[in-house]
Each structure stands twice: as structure tokens, then as C-alpha cells.
Amino acid sequence: MSDLRFEDHAVHSPATRGFRLNKQRGKIMGVSAGIADYFGLDTTLVRVAWVIGTIAGFGSLILIYLAIGLIAD
């Protein structure tokens, strides 16, 4: 047998460390800042997406935001 070893040198993506709220950069509960950190986006873009989604969904994203804020660490 040969001494070949295969090692995974993949860059660690945000998915490997899990989702966390970011209360230091957050305005209300840190959900938008946590999502921005997780996906590598700008926090302002995530906040604008929440507002547009809330308006388009007749307020249903407010419940999802609260659920994420209460369930996530």
C-alpha cells in the first residue's frame, strides 16, 4: 500500500461555523447582522431585503424575524 493521504484543504465557509446573531452590529435583535455575517453580505442589503419582504408579504416576515431572533443563539 502507498502512503497517500487525502486532506481536505477547503476554505471554511460560513456554513461550517453555523448561524449566530450579531448583537454588537444589530439594531433590534441582531438577526439581519447575523444573516449578513453568515452569507458574507452587507448588513444594509439584508435590512432592506427584510423591509421589502415585509411590505410585499403583508407583514409575514415580521413573525419570521421574531422567530429567528428568539430561537437563534
Image (spheres, rainbow, N blue to C red):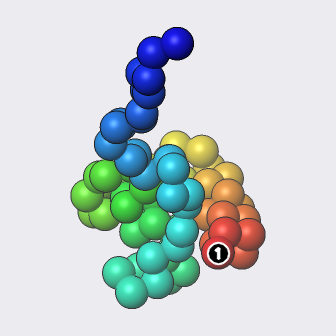
Q: Residue at x 51, y 50 (%)?
A: 16
In the figure, is residue 51 to the left or right of 9? right
What residue is shown at x 62% (from left), y 55% (from top)? Answer: 61
At label 1, the amino acid type is Asp
Q: Which residue is mark 1?
A: 73
Q: Specify the quadrant of the image occupied by residue 71.
A: bottom right
Q: Residues within 10 Å of mark 1 (few under 14, many from 20)?
A: few
Residue 51 visible to an observer of this rendering? no
Q: Is residue 18 left or right of residue 34?
A: right
In the rendering, at what x and y percent does residue 13 appear? 40, 46
Query: Which residue ends up furthest to the bottom in the rendered image?
Result: 24
Q: Please state the horizontal and vertical placement of residue 66, each as a whole percent of the image.
A: 67, 69
Residue sitting at 41 percent across and 80 percent down?
26
63 is higher (above) or lower (below) than 15: below
In the image, residue 2 sits, relative to residue 65, either above or below, namely: above
Between 28 and 30, which is closer to the camera in this rendering?
30
Spot occupied by residue 55 in the image (x, y as percentages of width and height): 51, 51
**Nearer the observer, 10 or 2:** 2
The residue under the point 66% across, 69% down is 72
Element marked by disc 1: loop
The answer to which image quadrant residue 64 occupies is bottom right
In which quadrant is the C terminus drawn?
A: bottom right
**Up/down of 4 relative to 49, above or below:** above
Q: So how many labels did they put on this image?
A: 1
Q: Looking at the image, which is closer to me, 7 or 38?
A: 7
Is residue 70 in view?
yes
Which residue is farthest top?
1
